[in-house]
Image: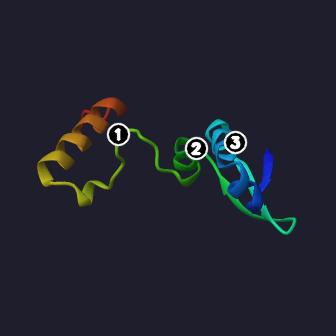
Amino acid sequence: MKAFSFTDINKTPGEVLDEALKGPVMLTKRGKERLVLMPADQFRRLAGRHNDPRVAGKTKEMPADLAADVLKAADAYLGDDDK
């Protein structure tokens, strides 16, 4: 991971931002690591917020008709035809 100082941000912001778009960049102040800049998609992956349209939820939090459909599909998938 490349490192830049806070002073580098003031002197050559384009270089710092170009590198941060490629991957994480460490920002230091007085020689100590302070911040990390990274592409938004990498941050979302790390934070668990993907751009995935699929959503997980609890059936008790769904509208009743949707929950019934989900449970029916799960039963069919598992081969539970007793219901």
**Residue at the image position 59 percent from the left and 50 percent from the top:** 46
Where 34 sits versus 40, above or below?
below
Describe the element under mark 1 as helix, strand or loop: loop
Describe the element under mark 2 as helix, strand or loop: loop
Mark 3, other Cα within 10 Å: few <14 / some 14–19 / many ≥20: few
Q: Amino acid at mark 1?
A: Arg
For this rendering, which residue is in front, 45 or 19?
A: 19
**Residue at the image position 14 percent from the left and 53 percent from the top:** 64
Q: Amino acid at mark 3?
A: Glu
Q: Which quarter of the figure has residue 33?
A: bottom right
**Residue at the image position 79 percent from the left and 62 percent from the top:** 28
**Residue at the image position 75 percent from the left and 54 percent from the top:** 8
Circle 2/circle 1 CB separation < 8 Å: no
Q: Residues under labels 3 and 2: Cα distance?
A: 14 Å
Where 9 sits versus 72, above or below?
below
Q: Is residue 22 left or right of residue 41?
A: right
Q: Upstream in the sequence, badge 3 or badge 2?
A: 3
User: At which x and y percent is residue 20?
Assistant: 65, 44
Q: Upstream in the sequence, badge 3 or badge 1?
A: 3
Callout in the foreground (3, 1): 3
Residue 54 numbered mark, or none: 1
Which residue carries the number 2 mark? 39
User: At which x and y percent is residue 74?
Assistant: 31, 38
Callout in the foreground (3, 2): 3
Instruction: Identify the image quadrant of the C terminus.
Output: top left
Mark 1, other Cα within 10 Å: few <14 / some 14–19 / many ≥20: few
Which residue carries the number 3 mark? 15
Q: Which quarter of the figure has residue 39?
A: top right
